[in-house]
Amino acid sequence: MSDQVYLYIALGIYFAGMLAIGFFAARRTKDHEDYMLAGRNLPPWVAALSAGASDMSGWLVMGLPGAIYATGLIEAWIAIGLTIGAYLNWLIVAPRLRAYTEVSNNSITVPSFFENRLKDRSRLLRIVSALIILVFFTLYISSGMVAGGVFFESSFDGDYLVGMLLVTGVTLAYTLFGGFLGASLTDVAQGLLMMVALILVPVVAIANVGGLGAVGEAIASASPDALSFTGGEALSGATVLAIVSALAWGLGYFGQPHIIVRFMALPSPAGAKPARRIGIGWMVISMGGAVIAGLAGIAYFDQPGVEELANPETVVLRMSQILLHPLIAGFVLAAVLAAIMSTISSQLIVCSSALVEDLYKVVRKAPPRDRTLVILGRSCVLAVAIVAALLAISPNDTILGLVAFAWAGFGASFGPLILLSLFWKRLTAWGVLAGMVSGSVIVFTWPLLGTGVYELLPGFIGALIIAVLVSLATYRANADIEREFTDTAALTIARPGAPA
């Protein structure tokens, strides 16, 4: 049997498994809240692995190892920043957001939470936040589709467009019918597959080179600055700025709708504590493996007789194909697809909820039937996927570049406002609106200045300052807001295991 046949067998098994999980979830999706939030009954371990897998996308298995391979450990500051940000997100945001969304009119989306939390009767806040979700998530989903096309191009010498459409089609199938539960359960399987692959590939590569000592010597010879966290430069203002920009990725966690919606789906605020431990454990192992894989790749591809690596973002793919049995390599390749597809599915559900919950329900006066909402939700998943696929046909940026822009957009537009809405009583609807718009504008315009600072950092700070200033200028006491804020604090503290 040829190597290619083994690869296709592994991918076939993977695709069949994802579709089976989607079918299982579809049978347990009875109504609109099930489709959008799994009935607020997602077990903590599922929420943890689902949040991690949907967060990482193709960046974890392709973008991060590729950046380490090309530039060295200076790129690892992104992984460090993300780990810190994820930990704080689970620690301070998850339990309180789960409690607050229940107290504030059982909000099941981020835009509806903002509207209910701030008692905004104009509906403007809900509409603007839903539109921001649609814009940035369409770009984010498109980046995943690009990763799928690149994957097939590099792994099978196939056609980019065929690969992109195949990944999109299978992901769309299980998401369309399985909804939030389908996306979450497939995320669990995909997250575990990714973690195993990111342990296996670097271990085998290190053994092939001759052990850790030989890897270190080879890296020092091939790329002396790769093992430096400062890129081999003296600690200067520019270096510090680059490190701060990389660490700033962690700020993005507070505003990612596809991640924080997992907090809202927990059975209770107390579930955040075990979920945090599982989620951060998975993240440390997986990102550590990705960093080591990038470094091991430098040593491996520097060996005599080993073909040159054309695209750094394929370092994990190429090492798995060369070093592992083709069937095992096929499952490693499936792990790459898992990273890509887990993110796409989660983001499609959030886009669907924005269209149905936060736009359709606003313009329709009569309450729609629940069956109508489920059909609309599925239709919106399909529509967003088509738009994102059209954008992915001719990509003009790297996977990491596409992800970085969308991550910054959500981190700056929503991150400061989620934190303020949870912990500051004087926040107002006008403050949130001003913060959202300013965060988005800064993210779009900051790269034009050419400062080298990641746009998330100025966007986050700018949105935070503007939201506070506008809120102070427009604040009016509201008894319902005061009561819900107090009730949320009491509910969060009362749950065993939740931080005060």
Image (cartoon, rainbow, N blue to C red):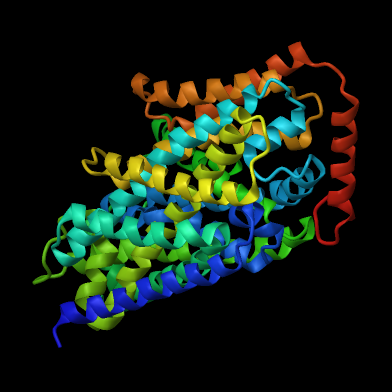
Query: For residue 162, what is the image quadrant?
Result: bottom left
Kindly identify the residue that appears in the image at 86 percent across and 37 percent down: 484
Of 131 and 227, the residue lying toward us: 131
Q: Position of residue 138 (x, y in %)?
A: 41, 39
* Rendered position, 18 above or below 478: below
Say above or below: 494 vs 325: above
159 left or right of 231 in image: left
* One can see residue 67 in this view: no
Instruction: List the single residue furthest toward the top.
Output: 473
Q: Where is residue 483 shown, x and y percent of the image?
A: 90, 34
Residue 450 occupies which quadrant of the picture?
top left
Number of on-image labels: 0
Q: Position of residue 418 (x, y in %)?
A: 67, 36
Q: Quadrant of the N terminus?
A: bottom left
**Residue 140: quadrant of the picture:** top left
Along the viewing direction, whichever of 29 and 421 lies nearer the viewer: 29
> Which residue is rendered at x = 23% and y = 37% of the image?
396
Asked whether residue 196 appears in the rendered view, the answer is yes
Nearer-the-camera pick, 94 or 224: 94
On screen, residue 352 versus residue 308, left or right, reads: right
Q: Is residue 414 left or right of residue 382?
A: right
Q: Position of residue 127 (x, y in %)?
A: 58, 27
Q: Is residue 254 above or below residue 448?
A: below
